[in-house]
Image (tube, rainbow, N blue to C red):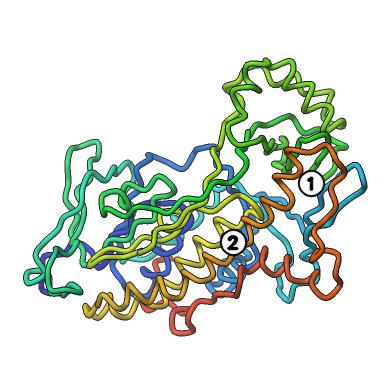
């Protein structure tokens, strides 16, 4: 620690995949981390339950992959859309050059519990559940030791948070906001995201899965409707895509009409749509795609959904958030541990992650326009985009789904813990 009265080298707000992975990586590197999570536990109905090959490779680099895969999970190695004209294979991961050529579906709560338990083995890791951040602690630059770009303004030096026992302050030379698409840290910092307008929203719901059902996840498209069906063990989790703003019309038509639409789109589930008895069983996700122009200010950085909200196309949001965490650990661990953090270090994290983020968002926008918007507004048979039919380009979608625009790996010096974990 530095001579200032800090409670941690780094305060991370948000115990989702990005925040939890970053906290673990920094703690292993000998950085004192305080991770604040506003909920009392992780027992929520997450929809982003995917662990991509790049994340599995990180777990392998940390020596955790085999233990992680002991948690009940399912795997898919192909993304296929069943259309009236026949199956459209969007991506096959089987040929990826990795030990993990598949997407792992695991309840996110169990993944976060696993990471939290691993982090708890290190004396440099502190997790505070039920900590609701209320404000930022800011100081003049001459008191903080970090200069601002123009010699003015203030420097973030911690947060105020409310817990069951009242209001607390936690001081740290760096606050990292990893608190999701509705980030309070982003709002408190005054960062305004640039938003786009995806053409769809998603209704999420679950139906019973029975013995004899197929194992694989799949997509269905017909008559202006599109759905993605995911294997969740004893349930099917279904993403039912609708035109942006179309929920009111569906709701007004009533549950019987909605059940009939599902049965027509996915006939093999027609015998169990009656399990949908209340609209409360369906959760509406308003699809958004956005990014903040600047991810940092003196003493503060945002990553993951706090910096860039991804469309659900390709299911890469968690993958990109965790890659942000890896890059942040690579860049920041040394300066934080040495007490020599500079504004340029924060800028370096954005510089390394902004282009891949903008590129994938642009690609998602094209798929939304060429595939999803057409599927939701036309009853015509859908043909795959030309690039998916060209042999030389077919390998690109699997690599992007599995690893992003380019692979991100943990720096070699961070793969071995700097401190001894407890047994």
Cα distance in 3D space between marks 2 and 1: 24 Å
N-terminal-most mark, 2 or 1? 1
In percent of the image, x 45 and y 66: which residue is there?
Answer: 325
On screen, residue 394 above or below 189: below
Q: On the rendered structure, is 284 left or right of 416?
A: right
Task: Say what secondary structure mark 2 lies in.
Answer: helix
Q: Which residue matches tag 2? A: 362
In percent of the image, x 46 and y 54: which residue is there?
Answer: 305
Quadrant of the rendering where the N terminus is positioned: bottom left
Is residue 113 something that shows in the picture?
no
Task: Say what secondary structure mark 1 lies in.
Answer: strand
In percent of the image, x 17 and y 64: which residue is there?
Answer: 155
Q: On the rendered structure, is 201 left or right of 80?
A: left
Q: Whole-percent x and y of residue 86?
A: 92, 48
Q: Whole-percent x and y of residue 213?
A: 85, 38
Question: From this viewpoint, which residue is outermost toward the bottom?
Answer: 413
């Amino acid at each position: 620690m530095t001579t200032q009265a800090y409670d941690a080298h780094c305060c991370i707000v948000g115990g989702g995949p990005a925040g939890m992975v970053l906290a673990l990586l920094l703690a292993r590197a000998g950085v004192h981390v305080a991770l604040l999570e506003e909920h009392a536990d992780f027992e929520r109905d997450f929809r982003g339950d995917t662990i991509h090959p790049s994340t599995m490779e990180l777990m392998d680099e940390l020596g955790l992959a085999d233990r992680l895969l002991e948690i009940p999970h399912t795997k898919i190695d192909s993304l296929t859309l069943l259309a009236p004209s026949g199956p459209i294979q969007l991506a096959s991961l089987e040929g990826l050059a990795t030990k993990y050529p598949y997407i792992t579906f695991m309840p996110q709560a169990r993944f976060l519990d696993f990471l939290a338990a691993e982090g708890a083995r290190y004396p440099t890791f502190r997790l505070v559940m039920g900590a609701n951040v209320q404000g930022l602690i800011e100081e003049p630059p001459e008191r903080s030791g970090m200069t601002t770009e123009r010699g003015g303004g203030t420097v973030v030096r911690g947060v105020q948070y409310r817990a069951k026992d009242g209001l607390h302050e936690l001081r740290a030379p760096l606050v990292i906001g990893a608190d999701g698409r509705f980030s309070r840290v982003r709002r408190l910092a005054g960062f305004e995201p640039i938003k786009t307008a995806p053409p769809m929203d998603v209704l999420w719901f679950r139906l019973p899965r029975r013995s004899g059902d197929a194992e694989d996840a799949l997509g269905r498209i017909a008559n202006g409707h599109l759905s993605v069906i995911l294997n969740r063990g004893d349930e099917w989790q279904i993403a039912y895509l609708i035109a942006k703003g179309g929920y009111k019309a569906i709701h007004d038509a009533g549950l019987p009409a909605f059940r009939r639409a599902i049965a027509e789109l996915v006939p093999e589930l027609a015998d169990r749509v009656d399990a949908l008895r209340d609209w409360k069983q369906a959760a509406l996700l308003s699809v958004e795609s956005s990014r903040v122009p600047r991810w940092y200010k003196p003493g503060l950085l945002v990553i993951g959904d706090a910096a860039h909200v991804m469309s659900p196309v390709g299911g890469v949001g968690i993958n990109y958030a965790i890659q942000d965490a890896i890059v942040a650990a690579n860049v920041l661990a040394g300066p934080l541990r040495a007490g020599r953090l500079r504004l340029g270090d924060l800028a370096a994290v954005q510089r390394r992650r902004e282009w891949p983020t903008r590129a994938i968002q642009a690609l998602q926008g094209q798929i939304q326009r060429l595939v999803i918007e057409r599927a939701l507004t036309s009853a015509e048979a859908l043909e795959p985009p030309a690039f998916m039919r060209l042999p030389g380009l077919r390998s690109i979608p699997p690599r992007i789904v599995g690893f992003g625009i380019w692979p991100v790996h943990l720096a070699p010096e961070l793969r071995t813990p700097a401190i001894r974990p407890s047994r």
